[in-house]
Amino acid sequence: MEQPASAYFMEERHDPNETHTLTVLVANEPGVLARVIGLFSGRGYNIESLTVSETESHKHVSRITIVTTGTPMVITQIKHQLDRMIPVHRVVDMTLTGRSIERELAMVKLRGTGEHRVEALRLAEAFRARVIDATIESFVFEITGNTGKINQFIDLMRPLGLVEISRTGVAAISRGPEGM
Amino acid sequence: MSDSKPHDPNQMTGAAMIVRALADHGVKHIFGYPGGAVLPIYDEIYQQSEVEHILVRHEQGAGHAAEGYARSTGLPGVVLVTSGPGATNMVTPLADALMDSIPLVCITGQVPTHLIGNDAFQECDTVGITRPCTKHNWLVRDVNDLAKVLHEAFYVATTGRPGPVVVDVPKDVQFATGTYHPPRKSDVHISYAPRVKGDANAIRKAVSLLAGARKPIIYSGGGVINSGLAASKLLRELVEVTGFPITSTLMGLGAYPASGPNWLGMLGMHGTYEANMAMHDCDVMLCVGARFDDRITGRTDAFSPNSKKIHIDIDPSSINKNIRVDIPIIGDCGNVLGDILQVFKSEAKKPDTKDWWKTIATWRARNSLAYKKNDDVILPQYAIQRLFEATRGHDTYITTEVGQHQMWAAQFFGFEEPHRWMTSGGLGTMGYGLPAALGVQVAHPDSLVIDIGGDASVQMTMQEMSAAVQHELPIKIFILNNQYMGMVRQWQQLLHGNRLSHSYSEALPDFVKLAEAYGGVGFQCSKPGDLDGALQEMIKVKKPVLFDCRVAALENCFPMIPSGKAHNEMLLPLEANDEATAAAFAGGKALV
Ligand SMILES: Cc1cc2nc3c(=O)[nH]c(=O)nc-3n(C[C@H](O)[C@H](O)[C@H](O)COP(=O)(O)OP(=O)(O)OC[C@H]3O[C@@H](n4cnc5c(N)ncnc54)[C@H](O)[C@@H]3O)c2cc1C
Ligand SMILES: Cc1ncc(C[n+]2csc(CCOP(=O)(O)OP(=O)(O)O)c2C)c(N)n1
């Protein structure tokens, strides 16, 4: 590839991208989510999934779980950029700790009759998905698991009359007795 | 409750709290512009004398003035502006201060809380708009939170990596009465705790690298200025103790004196040949408070390929952002330099750098800042050199606008001390220098304050001449008038086939008459032989001055690292004839 002739072009980085799950503990105050999201859009970082909720209300602490992709240098930048925000208490790279459990919840709506219904129910059982709503011509399944399992379930449901999916995004926690 | 309860002196309105907090933080001057949403605060300002208010002519001017004030004193600059357009006019200085790590506290008025979100008159989402251009910002909805937020704002702006903050105060909160308290530790988020002291292990490793270096270089930056006078002193001592050569970024000029024997000049795109060559060929690089900006590194894959790199920075996000380093040390550079010196003095001796200095001498001999003398027209480089000579012996502060004149000022004006050089480096904001000079002069009323400007830049904030006249601030605006947006014209010549699209300054005003119209003094000079005399006259004047220095129109700023090239492939001024230039920039389009 011919490089553009400038003293200051940014050459492409060829390091492969990695996917990391970050847990961010923040002060639960107005605007904090906007700061985090603004950081990602402003600096061109990827958000694959983001979940947030207050987890320790007496301490006004919320927990944000972000799944992001980037080169190792970019992932490190993301962590430093998050960490230097004033209301951010801690940033933990769950992927680096190698000891994290990650779960998502999805609700999957299916429309169909006859053979498709039977097949869907059979698969749901294999994936431990629960039926949380049913009519004569539809089901809503609830399934939890890691992202891969949920993707697989959705792929299997697609030919059986998939109508709609709602997913929570990833929540993560570390294994073992220690808290973060 | 009885009626005889004594009046609690800490009960006051939000507006009074703001003025009180300024006084409690030792603020002597604020820069601002009134409007509906800050009238209660202006009313408080009117009734006291601790804090002096400098009225500008445009909120952007207030912001840059506060930046100049901050950079020349080491204190935070404080700004007060109204809601809506007042706040949006502040966006440029906030972004500028964020880029250059300048501590600013900006207080903005906001529409009353019950109207927020209603598209009320002069409403804008100030915290939303300024979020990405501040270190942090706050909207205060309750008067009882105001004291805490104001104190935290000062703390955040001035500690760690300094930066601008905004406190947005709705008008009803300014009117409401609540309880004030003086600054206390618990005002600050517990999650905010910048690291000041460097890791002892890393410092030890750094010293052993430094001690073993044969081709070392110290690359210092704006962080040394941010850290305060002590850091510059320690930096000088380190240079002395090690005998290492030192270069600096645009933002770090003055930390090491330009007359010092180990000074290589500025590095980077328009830096000296010796500084860039030494960066390229060194075996150990000590980066102190600089951020490997793209104006420095050029192609990152060809940047100083064979060196071990040590990086001292207070902001972990500056480390490994553009360039991978071997030994990161997170901490304040004054603090870390102190520790490095201590370990170095007790465990190492001065490395032998004789051969390295010999190599550097051959690079110096290329004389990369040379220019052809001319008796008929003033060359801009010559003008800066004469200005520098004329100001010797004066207590001088220099600000600049953005463009070629800024680079020539950096190359040819020798800075001996930190805090004497105010320039917009990161954002590159034309119109910065004139109001910045105003702010510097407020802080240093008896000093000689000069804005080195270009004919295009100064017109962006020219109206602050009126503020300078009002407040009797005798700033000197020294305009290198080449009748072009010279820096743009240079790039068009070198990279866009000399198609000078919209870079000619048509219809320039008569700067002498303009100065007089404002109530200042105008000078014009177009002959090299007249320049020294005119400069002496300018310095004598105790009023704001516009000095129209007519310079060669088509001079280019060299040295320059040309297209797609690394540090060791610079284009030097006397070698930049038409063919060499054409070859160096052949077929290129610049991305940045
Ligand atoms: C037209 C134009 C041309 C330019 N050409 C050049 C050029 O040729 N050469 C050049 O050098 N620049 C040039 N610049 C400026 C350039 O864009 C950057 O602004 C500049 O190089 C950055 O300087 P710095 O690395 O010192 O960083 P700064 O922006 O000053 O950042 C300071 C760094 O120090 C850290 N820091 C802050 N406080 C502390 C502390 N107390 N302790 C430790 N660390 C601290 C910060 O976290 C940050 O990483 C040019 C600008 C313009 C407008
Ligand atoms: C606010 C703003 N707009 C545009 C630019 C792009 N720009 C950089 S330098 C320059 C020309 C400056 O001309 P002048 O002030 O006359 O200085 P000279 O380069 O001629 O010394 C321009 C337009 C900028 N840096 N800032």
Image (cartoon, coloured by chain):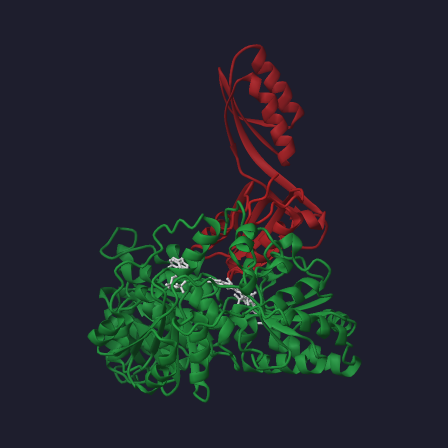
Residues B394 and B309: in front is B394
Across and down, in percent, residue B143 comes to 34, 68
Among all residues in the image, which is located at the extreme front? B375
Across and down, in percent, residue A81 comes to 56, 57
Residues B155 and B63: in front is B63
Give me the residue at 46% from left, 62% from top: B556
In the figure, the shade used to draw chain A is red
Give me the residue at 51% from left, 55% from top: B578
Height in image: B556 above or below A100?
below
Q: Is residue A17 left or right of residue B354?
A: left
Height in image: B321 above or below B461?
above
In the figure, the shade used to draw chain B is green
Task: Please state, as top left, top right, bottom left or bottom right, where the N terminus of chain B lies in the image.
Answer: bottom left
Across and down, in percent, residue B252 comes to 54, 72
Height in image: B559 above or below B210?
above
Residues B517 and A40: in front is B517
